[in-house]
Image (cartoon, grey):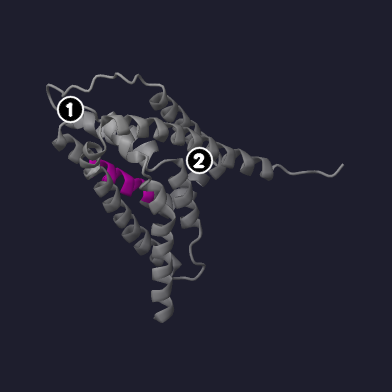
Amino acid sequence: MRDTIVELVRSLLLVVGALFPIVNSPENIPVFLDMTSGFPAESREILARKIAVDGFALLVVSVMIGTHILAFFGISLPVVQIGGGLILVAAGWQLLNQADDKPSAPRLTPPTSSALSRLAFYPLTMPFTVGPGSISVAIAVGANRSPRSEGTWILLSTAVLGCVILALSIYLLYRFAEPLGRVLGDTAMSIIIRLSSFILVCIGVQIVWNGVSALLQSIPVHPG
C-alpha cells in the first residue's frame, strides 16, 4: 500500500512538474491579450475556460495514448517536434512582424460562440499554450509509466488529476491576463509582445533542432 501511494505521488509530481512551466509560460499572457484585442471581458473569460478545457483534453490524450497514436500513424516523436516547432516559428514570426499601430478599438458586437471556439483551439491552445514542446513532454511522461501491473491505473489517475491541476492553472493565467495588462500599460505590453514573439520563434527553432538532432542520431552509421 505504501509503495502504491509513493508511486502515485511520484507520478503526479512528474506530470505536473514537467508540464507546468511549459503550459504556463509568461509569454502566453501578452500573446493572449494581443490576439483578443477589442474583445469584451466576458469573451476573454469564455476563451480562458475553453483554452483550459482544450488544453486538458490535449494533455490527457498525449499522456495516456500519445505513443499509441504516433505508432498507429507511423510518426516518430522527433517528427512531431519538427512539425510543431515549424508551426510555432511561423506563429511567432507573424506576431513579431505585425504593425505596431494595429487598431484596438472595442468591437461593436462580441464574437460568436463558434468564433471563440475556433480561436480558443487554434492558435491559443495549440500551439501557444499546449504546443509541440508540451505535447512531446507529455508523450514522454506517458511512455515513462511503471512496468508493474498497477502502472496503468496509476498513470490514468495521476494523468487525469495532474491535467486537471494544469487546466486550472491555464484558466487562471488567462482569466487574469487583462488586469495584469492594465497594470503594465500599452507601452510595456507592446515591448513584452515583441520580446515574447521573439522568444516563441527561438523556442520553435529549438524544438525543431531537438527533432532534427534526434533524427540524425537515429541514422545508422556503418563503419567503412
Q: Residue furthest left?
A: 108
- Can residue 121 be seen by looking at this rendering? no
Q: Which mark is residue 130?
A: none
Give the residue drawn at x 45%, y 36%.
199
| Image x and y of residue 168, in percent | 26, 52
Residue 56 coordinates in the image, percent (x, y): 32, 49
51 vs 88, left or right, is left
In this rendered view, identify the residue nearer to me: 198 or 204. Answer: 198
- State the image coordinates of residue 175 (x, y, percent, origin top left): 22, 44
**Where is residue 176 drawn, in percent x and y?**
22, 44
Provide the residue span drawn in magenta. Answer: 48-59
Query: In terms of depth relative to the viewer, which is nearer, 90 or 74?
Result: 90
User: In the figure, 196 relative to 68: above or below?
Assistant: above
Label ID, residue 73: 2
Q: Tell whether 120 sits left or right of 140.
A: left
Q: What's the amino acid at mark 1?
A: Pro
Badge 1 marks a residue whose secondary structure is: loop
Residue pictured at 41% horizontal, 33% vertical: 195
Q: Where, quadrant-wise, is the C terminus in this rendering?
A: top right
Indicate whether residue 78 is drawn in magenta: no
Report the disc number at residue 111.
1
